[in-house]
Image: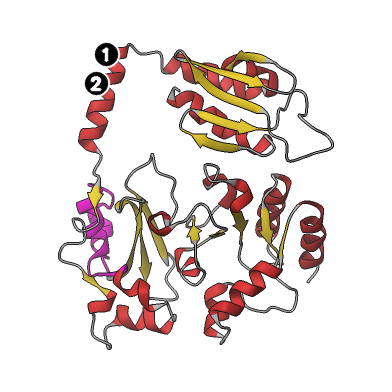
Amino acid sequence: MLWLEQKYIGLLSNRLRNFRRKSASLYNFSCPICGDSETDKGKARGYVYVKQGKTLYHCHNCNVTSGFEKFLKTIDESLYKEYSIDKLRDSKTPQQVDLEQFVSKMKKPVFMLTEPFKGLKKVSQLDHDDSVKKLVVDRKIPNPYHSKLFKCPKFFTWANSIVPGKFDDEALLYDETRLLIPFLTKDKKMHAFQGRSLDSKSRTKYITIVVDEEVPKVYGLDQLDETKKIYVFEGPIDSMFVPNSIATAGGDLTATVTSFPRDKLVIVYDNEPRSPDTRKKIDKAIVNGYNVCIWPSNLEHKDVNDMVLAGLSLEFVRYIIDTNTHRDLRAKMALNSWSRV
């Protein structure tokens, strides 16, 4: 499947009920042409797949078969026009494509776990009076993560050694020590990293930098079990308190996790009932069929880390999330009640 087709099936995914990415060249969802099943909303008999080098769509319910372009045009004509323009821009010879892919691989740094952190100390190796150690201990981050986090004395300079030219000379004048949070793939390669400021009043408390654009900007891939329930948080630190969790480093959580099995995910936004932006994102997750956590109205703490700092046990925090996870109409009702707090 061409990268362009992968891009546009991803853009269309939010409108496809029960959307799942089964492999790099196979996608499954409820047929948007026939509706698949009005009595069983879980039915998903539409497939986008590759056969003899061509990307096709087929529904096992209404037996519609078409090329991907025709399918895209049928579902969303405006998106189809964007696809057509992109396709014209990308009309290169096979030799050009091969050359660009070769050059891209030569430029793109891919690091094993032990390579980029050479010269940096893990938090577990720091003295107890070290400022980075104090930050981690004061936030009550679980001990197992102390060996996965690092002290980065000159974060901007170090970032430039990973992604050349990321920070200019003016930024380097204000270089500072930050807590380094690496984002690792399943095979322990760093695909992104985040620097957390030691100053709680910093205007840029978190700086997230992507190393490999082909990997979703998700923290926690290295220890994720996709056969179990997966909790999705806004920030990596919150995800460290709940087993089998990932984080998207802010933004629209559902837009970042489209490649994961939707029925396994629990979307957990911060406890901000007065934030129109947060309410809008939760509503979008509900409309797209995700399980969402709607925090109880008597809970005052903004996020999971604040709950732990207030004395709630990790087990109880998880219990709160599990007992306040909703979907579809129940989620809508819970969101309306939560929004009125």
Colour scheme shown: secondary structure
Q: Is residue 193 left or right of residue 68?
A: left
- Residue 93 occupies which quadrant of the picture? top left
- Residue 333 occupies which quadrant of the picture? bottom right
Q: Where is residue 252 in the image (x, y as percent from the top left)?
A: 57, 51
Residue found 63% across the figure and 49% down from its top:
263
Residue found 52% across the figure and 29% down from its top:
26
Q: Which one is nearer the viewer's eye here, 154 or 179?
A: 179
Q: Name the residue under label 1.
A: 95
Q: In which quarter of the image is the C terminus?
A: bottom right
Q: Which mark is residue 99?
A: 2
Q: Where is residue 330 in the image (x, y as percent from the top left)?
A: 80, 58
Residue found 50% across the figure and 24% down from its top:
5
Tag 1 near tag 2, CB within 8 Å: yes
Q: Position of residue 45 (x, y in %)?
A: 68, 29
Please tell me whether residue 158 belongs to the stretch shown in magenta.
yes
Please tell me whether residue 165 belongs to the stretch shown in magenta.
yes
Q: Residue type at mark 1?
A: Gln
Q: Would you say residue 252 is visible in this rendering?
A: no
Q: Is residue 64 above or below residue 131?
A: above
SS state under label 2: helix
Q: In which quarter of the image is the N terminus?
A: top left
Q: Rate crowding at label 1 as few (under 14), some (14 to 19) or many (20 or more) other CA atoms within 10 Å.
A: few
Label tally: 2
Q: Rate crowding at label 2 as few (under 14), some (14 to 19) or many (20 or more) other CA atoms within 10 Å.
A: few
Which residues fall within the magenta stretch? 148-176
Residue found 83% across the figure and 34% down from its top:
38
Q: Would you say residue 326 is visible in this rendering?
A: yes
Q: Residue type at mark 2?
A: Leu
Mark 1 → mark 2, Cα distance in angstroms: 6 Å
